[in-house]
């Protein structure tokens, strides 16, 4: 099935998210869609899949123009989409999530649903328990569920909006194998939206690049990375450089700390981080690194041991006291924990002001918001709700909201969902903080980022920790460690 | 003698709980789809008055019931229109409508105050009412009482066992996801809010045509707020909501029995009327406590999961939120 998007326009007030975009997707190919944060990729794909209606422009399927006002009509034409944040029902069972999309009949055919789910799953080696709840799944598994749902509905064109953010390396391999199979063996088309050039190189046959809502280039793969980068950002980017900072005093010390949770326990941890140091936490999702990081901010209950910040004992203290001691934490889940979707940017700035007076000085707040927006290059206005920002800009907003002087910064996935340039820029900002003696402890699933940015890496595996130096470890060794096949030396 | 008294009490609880059951189930259906119909109290008053007025004028109880349902559905339609189409605050609209309906019922109902009128006739169900114990408790009533019991069963079956019910849950849980799965969010919300409203209207009719015959000022005395509270206590699950309603009825009956006992003469009556709420809050605290978590953790995960779902309620994720389609 050949699909064409012709001259798609979509404006949000003054923002021209899509400004006349055309692209053609041949059947049996994987088509990459590249572009920096806010370039309009998600918007284009939402228009393509009927989730949003374009202001102008048409979609042609095999030459015939079709128009759809809802995802229901799009899927009837064989076009289905996996959204950037999985649009599923976390509180419902997997089977119910799966069955919900099917045609109206009074009684759902649970037995058949189970069978289809199992058979389709087996075809791609997805192992999903139909009776489990979606909350118990990782992001990667939630995507697998969505893929199965689209296939069961007969999707011929499958759109994946940044599917690789937030999934583990083995899950990524599985996903890529699946996509190859869907395109090359089953003759479907796949649209793959991403920032990550290596992934696009590895996977795609054809690439379209967007910038500021327009197409800035198209290329057949393989294509030199430097050309892709130029099309994305309008210029070439110099490689990252390492600056080493002489570590200062110990900022955080953990002695024999045990963090219990009902799935796994992080036990008897001893750990130190010094001013100016950057320590990366690696591991498959749910290996204990998140528990550990949250415990360092006083956000998890610690059942044994001691936590000292700058020599001051803070075991069992509240996050407020950690904040007072100069410790800040930014969660991975931007929309669920980090930001309040309905509040505007200004209101966020007002919200984080901890020492303000009782009455809000809205002019001052607005000024601070404007400053933050300018300084952090956020594409958005003070009166926009946070939910209207593109994923990358939400991340920038979270950084803009951090206090300016910190002793210790705890971050989950600081650059998840960010394009290469934004990620570089964010790290510049973070590393600049080191010079004031801020220590940084971060979780990442991106092995290159871990190796490139940290002085030391702590690998978590089933709640156990192992420390390695960043400069003499390779990506392969780190991958082995994460998978629990300990091969340090090498 | 003893058992007879018990059976009679239970039967009277079932009958007396009719309005609360109908209203709570109606509200549950509406809230399951994500729309809060806060106008319950006013809606019930207005439909009780209308139901009686129509039955009184036409002499047909059936027409009275239908008119009451139409009033309830109409109020719900206004809420749906204001919150879904106009994207206004559901709670504010509901609150204003409550006041408006109560005043309207008072004003329009004036000619009917304390007039004797028709009522739903007693109709034991043949055979079923002969079953020992269960028969007299459940099947020896009138049509509206049967409808209230049926509404519980149907609401549960529809939301938990059917495909459209699955969509209903989805729409209330996360409208964006439901939309992405091809569900027409706005239409479903309209439909279920109006159906829920019709049940609320029937709750009003059950008052004036079955429980507390006729019409007078403050005739329905705050029953709507009680129903709203029970939906929350019941965790938005039809059968748990029903248990809440009957428990509430039982506690009330117990209160009036105790009150007549000489030992409790000195206890203020307010204690008996407010005790059910205190007890419900206590029960809720107990169920959601960490102790229960620990107990559940001891069980095999599958069983624990099911038990957890059975005893604990959770509000629909998209409750009260409007969904904007771009
Ligand atoms: N619902 C909305 N209301 C207002 N503006 C919006 C809305 N959705 C998107 N935008 C704006 O449109 C532009 C394009 O956003 P889009 O989400 O398509 O970017 P993207 O390329 O997917 O970026 P990212 O890589 O960060 O996900 C952004 O500037 C964004 O702020
Ligand atoms: Mg996007």
Image (cartoon, coloured by chain):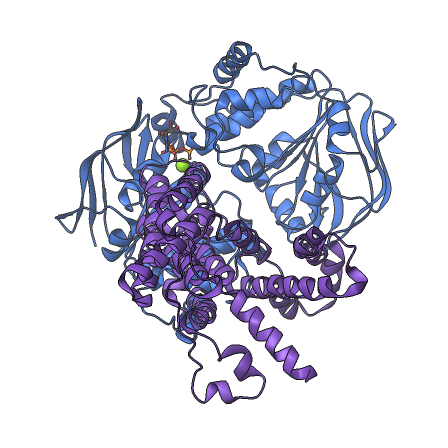
Chain colours: A blue, B purple
Question: In the picture shown, does residue A308 fall above or below A383?
Answer: below
Please tell me which residue is depicted at 68% across the width and 20% down the height of the picture: A434
In-front residue for pair A11/A81:
A11
In-front residue for pair A325/A466:
A325
In-front residue for pair A406/B112:
B112
Q: Quadrant of residue B148?
A: bottom left
Please tell me which residue is depicted at 41% across the width and 38% down the height of the picture: B93
Q: Pinpoint residue A114: horizontal percent, then vertical percent.
A: 44, 71
Q: Pinpoint residue B236: horizontal percent, then vertical percent.
A: 52, 57
Q: Quadrant of residue A219?
A: top left
Question: In the picture shown, does residue B163 fall above or below B200?
Answer: below
Residue A22 visible to an observer of this rendering: yes
In the picture, measured across the screen, residue B7 lies left or right of residue A157, that is right
Residue A86 visible to an observer of this rendering: no
In the picture, measured across the screen, residue B69 lies left or right of residue B4, that is left
Q: Pinpoint residue B37: horizontal percent, then vertical percent.
A: 43, 47
Quadrant where the image shows the N terminus of chain B: bottom right
């Amino acid at each position: 099935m050949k699909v064409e998007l012709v001259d798609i326009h979509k404006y949000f007030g003054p923002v021209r998210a899509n400004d006349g975009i055309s692209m053609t997707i041949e059947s049996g190919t994987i088509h990459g869609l590249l572009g920096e944060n806010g370039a309009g990729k998600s918007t284009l794909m939402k228009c393509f899949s009927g989730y949003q209606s374009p202001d102008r422009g048409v979609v042609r399927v095999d030459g015939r123009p079709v128009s759809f006002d809802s995802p229901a009509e799009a899927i009837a034409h064989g076009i289905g989409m996996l959204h950037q944040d999985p649009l599923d029902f976390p509180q419902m069972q997997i089977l119910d999530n799966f069955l919900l999309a099917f045609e109206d009949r009074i009684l759902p055919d649970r037995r058949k649903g189970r069978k289809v789910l199992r058979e389709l799953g087996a075809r791609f080696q997805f192992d999903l328990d139909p009776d489990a709840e979606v909350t118990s799944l990782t992001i990667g598994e939630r995507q697998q569920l969505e893929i199965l749902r689209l296939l069961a509905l007969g999707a011929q064109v499958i759109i994946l909006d940044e599917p690789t953010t937030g999934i583990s390396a083995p899950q990524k391999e599985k996903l890529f194998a699946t996509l190859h199979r869907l395109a090359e063996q089953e003759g479907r088309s796949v649209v793959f939206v991403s920032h990550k050039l290596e992934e696009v190189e590895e996977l795609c046959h054809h690439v379209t690049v967007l910038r500021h809502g327009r197409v800035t280039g198209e290329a057949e793969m393989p294509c030199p990375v430097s050309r892709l980068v130029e099309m994305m950002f309008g210029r070439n980017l110099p490689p990252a450089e390492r600056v080493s900072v002489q570590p200062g005093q110990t900022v955080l010390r953990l002695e024999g700390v045990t963090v219990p949770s009902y799935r796994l326990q992080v036990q008897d941890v001893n750990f130190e981080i010094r001013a100016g140091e950057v320590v990366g936490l690696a591991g498959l999702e749910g290996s204990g690194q998140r528990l550990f990081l949250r415990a360092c901010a006083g956000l998890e209950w610690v059942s044994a041991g001691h936590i000292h910040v700058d020599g001051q004992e803070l075991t069992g203290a509240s996050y407020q006291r950690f904040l007072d001691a100069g410790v800040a934490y930014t969660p991975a889940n931007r929309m669920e924990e980090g930001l309040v979707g309905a509040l505007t940017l200004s209101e966020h700035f007002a919200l984080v002001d901890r020492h303000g007076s009782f009455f809000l000085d809205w002019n001052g707040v607005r000024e601070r918001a404007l400053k933050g927006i300018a300084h952090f290059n956020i594409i958005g206005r003070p009166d926009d709700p946070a939910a209207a920002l593109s994923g990358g800009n939400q991340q920038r907003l979270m950084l803009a909201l951090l206090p300016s002087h910190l002793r210790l910064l705890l971050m989950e996935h600081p650059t998840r969902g960010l394009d290469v340039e934004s990620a570089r820029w964010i790290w510049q900002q973070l590393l600049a903080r080191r010079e004031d003696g801020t220590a940084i402890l971060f979780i990442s699933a991106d092995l290159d980022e871990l190796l490139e940015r940290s002085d030391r890496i702590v690998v978590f595996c089933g709640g156990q920790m192992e420390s390695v130096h960043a400069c003499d470890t390779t990506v392969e060794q780190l991958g082995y460690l994460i998978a629990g096949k300990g091969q340090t030396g090498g | 003698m003893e058992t007879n008294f018990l059976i009679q009490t239970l039967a009277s609880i079932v009958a007396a709980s009719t309005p609360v059951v109908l209203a709570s189930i109606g509200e549950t259906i509406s809230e399951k789809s994500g729309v809060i119909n806060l106008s319950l109290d006013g809606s019930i008053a207005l439909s009780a008055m209308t139901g009686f007025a129509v039955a009184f004028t036409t002499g047909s109880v059936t027409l009275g019931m239908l008119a009451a349902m139409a009033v309830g559905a109409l109020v719900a339609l206004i809420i749906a229109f204001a919150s879904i189409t106009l994207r206004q605050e559901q709670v504010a609209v509901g609150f204003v409508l409550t006041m408006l309906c109560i005043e309207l019922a008072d004003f329009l109902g004036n000619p009917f105050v304390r007039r004797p009128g028709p009522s739903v006739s007693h109709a034991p169900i043949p055979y079923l009412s002969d079953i020992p114990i269960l028969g007299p408790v459940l099947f020896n009533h009138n049509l509206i009482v049967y409808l209230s019991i049926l509404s519980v069963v149907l609401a549960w079956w529809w939301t938990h066992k059917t495909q459209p019910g699955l969509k209903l849950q989805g729409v209330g849980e996360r409208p964006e996801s439901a939309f992405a799965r091809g569900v027409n969010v706005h239409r479903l919300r309209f439909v279920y809010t109006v159906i829920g409203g019709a049940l609320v209207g029937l709750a009003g009719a059950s008052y004036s045509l079955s429980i507390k015959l006729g019409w007078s000022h403050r005739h329905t005395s705050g029953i709507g707020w009680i129903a709203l509270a029970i939906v929350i206590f019941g965790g938005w699950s039809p059968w748990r909501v029903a248990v809440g309603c009957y428990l509430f009825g039982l506690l009330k009956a117990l209160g009036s029995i105790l009150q007549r006992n000489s030992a409790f003469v000195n206890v203020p009556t307010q204690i008996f009327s407010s005790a059910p709420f205190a007890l419900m809050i206590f029960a809720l605290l107990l169920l959601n406590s960490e102790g229960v978590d620990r107990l559940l953790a001891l069980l095999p995960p599958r069983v624990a999961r099911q038990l957890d779902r059975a005893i604990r309620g959770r509000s629909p994720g998209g409750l009260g939120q409007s969904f904007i389609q771009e």
